[in-house]
Image (cartoon, helix red, strand yellow):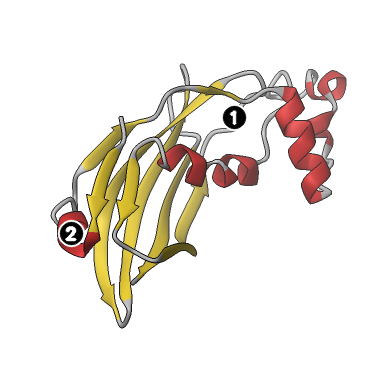
Amino acid sequence: MELTVNGTANIASLVGTHLGWTEWQVIDQDRVDRFAKATDDFQWIHVDPEKAATSQFGGTIAHGYLTLSLVPSLLKQLLLVEGASFGVNYGCNKIRFITPVLTGSQIRLGASIGEVVELKSGYQIVVDVTVEARDATKPAMVAQLLYNYYS
């Protein structure tokens, strides 16, 4: 369920509010392989199902940075910011990859607005996100991300 906000006054009122959870999304081997190709990261734990089957994970796992790279598209399911001429991903304060995402599993994202900071020509939103893998006992990833929106 997407929440649409317009401007700093509206988004600032959401500080501390959990925005909900996205739909579940499958992380299949094809996606992992395409990410490996795009990043030249062909570590066997990601791309060799036979060898990975003998590992402690019992199969291949998604790259942590693949999980992180999906955050912007998942976040769009929860939040749409209007009233700015453009927005940019400004970076991250903290990222932790807590539990591996097994290839073939499903993930979803939960998010909350941690802080809103006024900038000279816009504002920055600090978003706290958690990525869960279905049936996992711990989150796959937690991060604090920064998005700047300019007028």
Foreground residue among 117 and 6? 6
Q: Secondary structure at mark 2?
A: helix
Tell me the distance, in whole angstroms, between the alpha carbons under discs 2 and 1: 33 Å
Quarter of the image for residue 79 reads: top left
Badge 1 element: loop
Between marks 2 and 1 in the image, the one whose residue lies nearer the viewer: 2
Q: Quick check: 91 left or right of 26?
A: left
**Residue located at (26% from left, 70% from top):** 117
Kind of residue at badge 2: Ala
Q: Label 1 is placed on what type of residue?
A: Val
Residue identifier under label 1: 101
Q: Is residue 13 above or below residue 150?
A: above
- Classify 67 as above or below 83: above
- Which quadrant: the N terminus? top left
Horizontal side of 77 relative to 120 (left or right) equals right
Q: Position of residue 69 (x, y in %)?
A: 58, 46
The image quarter containing residue 28 is top right
Residue highlighted by disc 2: 12
- Image position of 18 (left or right of 135): left
Q: Quadrant of residue 63?
A: top right
Q: Position of residue 24 (x, y in %)?
A: 47, 22
Which is more N-terminal, label 1 or label 2? 2
- Checking the image for residue 130, the label placed there is none
Residue at 42% over, 24% down:
23
Q: What residue is drawn where x is 39% and y is 35%?
A: 77
Q: Mark 1: few, some, or many residues within 10 Å (few <14, many ≥20)? A: many
